[in-house]
Image (cartoon, rainbow, N blue to C red):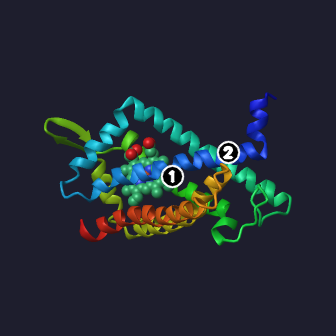
């Protein structure tokens, strides 16, 4: 085993992977939310559909997307491995670094993460897969023909069941983010008397505002579109 694979499979290496992939996913959520907020525009879906076309045809963004799928899987697999190792050693109340975990979210990261993974798989099936390979009507704006993803999303969120599923999933994401945000900084060794309270405060605001922003979209579409 090379020094690099030895490092990645060590407990420090595993935590590094968890924190770096986690931070990447945290940034993805912000970018994804900003793009999705265009679903709320009163323009019959034009800005959202043009945005979706750009996101799925730009080569640089396509490459980043492959990185995203890989990071989601790596984060999930690594998280489950850490969880099962902790369980086997009887340390379910401690994270691999031995830090005591006092919050409910901290003690249940693997469970919360598994629910999020199931959400992501269903969510990608519902929108991403349908957009790429499903039967989607087309729309034309200024002579440019695009797939009408806006209509796919609008149709999905006319269903109360889906809206409830999304809102509950966003609450789960809020708890996972709340612990994960500050934990990622701690794992990277960015622990400082002066900055840690600020990181915790930003993490709390982030973990409330981002899921709230996502939850507003299906609720708005259900009640106002
Ligand atoms: C109301 C909330 C949300 C809406 C309306 C929404 C909408 C969409 C749509 C329309 C797509 C397909 C088009 C595209 O690839 O950009 C998509 C893709 C995706 N969504 Fe969401 N999304 C929401 C929340 C989330 C959340 C909370 C997560 C993660 C926890 C997530 C993860 C993803 C992923 C990983 C993809 C594939 C991205 C890619 O191929 O680059 N989404 N979403």
What's the residue at 38%, 63% (across, down)? 213
Task: Please tell me which residue lies in front, 64 or 187.
Answer: 187
Give the percent coordinates (x, y) of residue 83.
Answer: 74, 56
Q: Are marks 2 and 1 in contact (CB under 8 Å)?
A: no
Disc 2 to disc 1, C-alpha distance:
15 Å
Q: Mark 1 — residue?
A: 26
Q: Ligand 1 closer than 8 Å to the CB at disc 2?
A: no
Q: Answer with mark 2 or mark 1, whichever residue precedes in sequence.
A: 2
Residue 124 in sight: no
Q: Look at 32% across and 65% down and name the residue there.
A: 158
The x and y percentages for residue 61 are 41, 35
Residue at the farthest right position: 89
Q: Looking at the image, which residue is at 23% across and 48% down?
A: 47
Q: Quadrant of the C terminus?
A: bottom left
Task: Name which residue lies at 21% across and 48% down.
Answer: 46
- Residue 140: image x %, image y %? 18, 41
Report the front residue among 7 and 118. Answer: 7
Quadrant of the frame with the N terminus: top right
Task: Identify the residue position indicated by label 2 in the image.
Answer: 16
Instruction: Check disc 1: other Cα within 10 Å, few if <14, some if 14-19, many if 20+.
Output: some
Say what secondary structure mark 2 lies in: helix
- The percent coordinates of residue 117 (x first, y second) are 57, 54
Secondary structure beneath dot 1 equals helix
- Count how many numbered circles sit on residues in the image: 2
> Taking the image as drawn, is residue 39 in sight?
yes
203 to 6, vertically: above or below: below
């Amino acid at each position: 085993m090379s020094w690099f694979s030895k490092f990645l499979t060590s407990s420090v290496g595993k935590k590094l992977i968890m924190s770096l992939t986690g931070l990447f996913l945290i940034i993805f959520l912000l970018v994804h939310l900003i793009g999705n907020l265009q679903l709320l525009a009163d323009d019959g879906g034009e800005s959202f559909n043009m945005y979706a076309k750009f996101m799925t045809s730009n080569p640089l963004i396509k490459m980043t997307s492959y990185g995203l799928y890989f990071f989601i899987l790596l984060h999930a697999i690594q998280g489950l491995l850490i969880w099962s190792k902790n369980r086997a050693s009887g340390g379910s109340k401690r994270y691999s670094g031995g830090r005591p975990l006092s919050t409910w979210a901290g003690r249940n990261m693997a469970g919360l993460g598994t629910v999020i993974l199931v959400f992501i798989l269903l969510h990608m099936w519902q929108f991403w897969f349908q957009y790429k390979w499903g039967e989607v009507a087309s729309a034309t704006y200024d002579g440019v023909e695009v797939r009408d993803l806006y209509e796919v999303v609008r149709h999905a969120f006319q269903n109360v069941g889906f809206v409830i599923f999304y809102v509950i999933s966003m609450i789960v994401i809020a708890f996972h983010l709340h612990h994960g945000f500050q934990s990622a900084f701690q794992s990277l060794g960015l622990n400082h008397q002066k900055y840690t309270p600020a990181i915790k405060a930003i993490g709390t605001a982030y973990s409330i505002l981002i899921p709230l922003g996502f939850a507003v979209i299906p609720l708005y579409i259900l009640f106002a579109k």
